Image (spheres, rainbow, N blue to C red):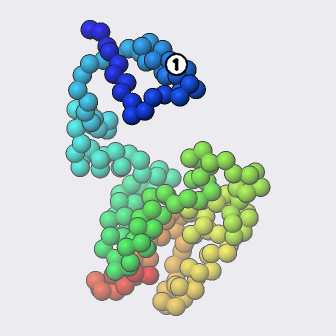
Amino acid sequence: MVWVWDLSRRRPLFVRELDLLADLLRIATRLSRVVRDDGWSWTSSPDGRYSVKSAYSHLFKALPAAGIPKGVVLQAVSAVWKSWAPSKVIVFSWQLLLDRIPSRSNLIRCGVHLPIDGRGCVFCDGSSESSVHLFLSCPSFFPVWYQVSRWLGWEFVMPLGLAQQFQAFTGLGGGRRVRLGLLLV
């Protein structure tokens, strides 16, 4: 099979473009061509077809594994969507529980180059800035949880993970309306 290039143009080429065209044709003729139909393929499924089950399996494998059972994270993530909070708060909560907010540790993990002195927490400049540190253990933010629990009249031990904190906080309420109100908070 002989491949013929049809390079129709709207206008004649300038002199400086003729060399570029020659380079393009030289590169294009060296390429090997495969004649087949284009199509989409879902790489997370053995048969290449997308399904909700294969997407769920793919996302489930990508859940954070910081010593927290995946079931706890899944329960917390599914409970977030039942909240009365605005949708942007729900999406942020979902990203926070899955450790997908742009904390400094996540930015470094994704290959964003940060200055050496800019890797600590933005509030306390102590340990590295991760989601868990920012929202649970940071000395600047921990008093917020203390004040909220005092305001609600509760005393509890701060859990190690965000999903466990979420479950502990929302599990303290009595009825359905109280739990939905706590989801809002």
**Residue 95 x/y as whole percent:** 45, 62
In the displayed structure, would residue 171 be above or below residue 61? below
The front one of 177 and 160 is 177
**Residue 18 x/y as whole percent:** 52, 22
* Quarter containing the C terminus: bottom left
**How crowded is the residue under tag 1: few (<14 C-alpha within 10 Å), some, or many (20+)?**
few
Q: Badge 1 is on which residue?
A: 23
In the displayed structure, would residue 158 be above or below residue 152? above
Task: Specify whether 38 is left or right of 182.
Answer: left
Q: Quadrant of residue 58?
A: top left
**Residue 123 x/y as whole percent:** 69, 70
Q: Secondary structure at mark 1?
A: helix
Q: Is residue 173 visible?
A: no
Q: Is residue 75 visible?
A: yes
The front one of 26 and 49 is 26
* Quarter containing the N terminus: top left
The front one of 97 and 23 is 23
**Residue 75 x/y as whole percent:** 34, 64
Q: Residue at x 27, y 36 (%)?
A: 40
What is the tally of numbered marks visible in this picture?
1
Task: Specify whether 101 is left or right of 4.
Answer: right
Q: Residue at x 56, y 79 (%)?
A: 145
Task: Specify whether 27 is left or right of 124.
Answer: left
Q: Residue at x 36, y 27 (%)?
A: 8
**Residue that sits furthest to the front in the current view:** 12
Q: Quadrant of residue 131?
A: bottom right
Question: What amino acid is labelled 1 in the image?
Answer: Asp
**Residue that sits furthest to the right in the current view:** 117
Q: Residue at x 22, y 45 (%)?
A: 51
